[in-house]
Image: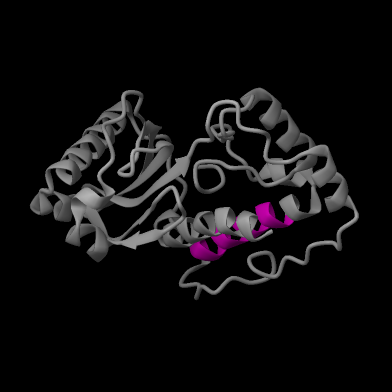
Amino acid sequence: MRGAMRRWWPGVLVGGVLIAVLAQPKAQPAPPVDDAAVLAADQTLGQALRNADRSVARRLLSLQFIFVDENGKIHERRDVLANLKAVAAAAAGDAAAKSYGRIAMVTGHRKSASDGDVFFLDIWAKQKGAWRAMVMQDVALAASGAPPVATAAAAASRADAKPYECKNPCQAIPYRVRSPAEQDVINSFQAVEKAAVAHDADEWSKHIADEFEIRPHRRDQTAERKQCRSDGRRGASHASYGL
């Protein structure tokens, strides 16, 4: 349970950081030019980290920026700027960007600063007319041939366990709502969490975007996606649901 909570918590934190940015009128998908601009900014930031170029990094990092490494450790903006090379990952060969109005994401695979194989999610926000990095998160990939996370015995033991009571975030989260739009974001997030805990696939799917992906640790992605939709459980995704 402790390990599961450790994996789950960074996603909740990322969701909280993004509430204020996401709380805006629904926007139409951004044109491809924004995708290219975000990808270029992401690549420029990566190069700045590797070169310890604090001037460029400071310009591209949002004041709310956080980095979550593959061990789940959270690095705030000031810590990153103090030691850029400590979080500098290798350049990704398969990076892809997708923008949604004032929010965009860049995903792919790369070598982390500690030389581990990771899937990464970089979330960008357009602030004062410029794209700035809000969140960078690395998710460690399991070694090839690693055993599945859950076994039949583990599943049977869970079936006999006491039902999980989800208070945070299902019932309340430690965040002060500042607008009706922010409340809408929180309501949707809580609906996803409640559906996951209740194994309510129908309700869960109402709040999940078509672009939603599960990133299994080198296991069969199709099987994971089918399993998640069949029982409504929480899965590893782009750091938060529907992003």
- Magenta stretch: residue 180 in it? no
Depicted 3 relative to depicted 102: above or below? below
Tell me if I can see residue 129 in this picture.
no
| Overall secondary structure of the magenta section | helix
Left or right: where does residue 93 sit relative to residue 46?
right
Depicted 149 relative to depicted 195: above or below? above
- Give the residue drawn at x 28%, y 40%: 89
Residue 157, how many percent across, how many down?
86, 51
- Give the residue drawn at x 58%, y 55%: 8
- Give the residue drawn at x 42%, y 61%: 17
Q: Quadrant of residue 113?
A: top left
Residue interval drawn in magenta: 181-194
- Magenta stretch: residue 184 in it? yes
Residue 192, how many percent across, how many down?
67, 52
Q: Nearer the viewer, residue 222 or 52?
A: 52
Q: How many marks?
A: 0
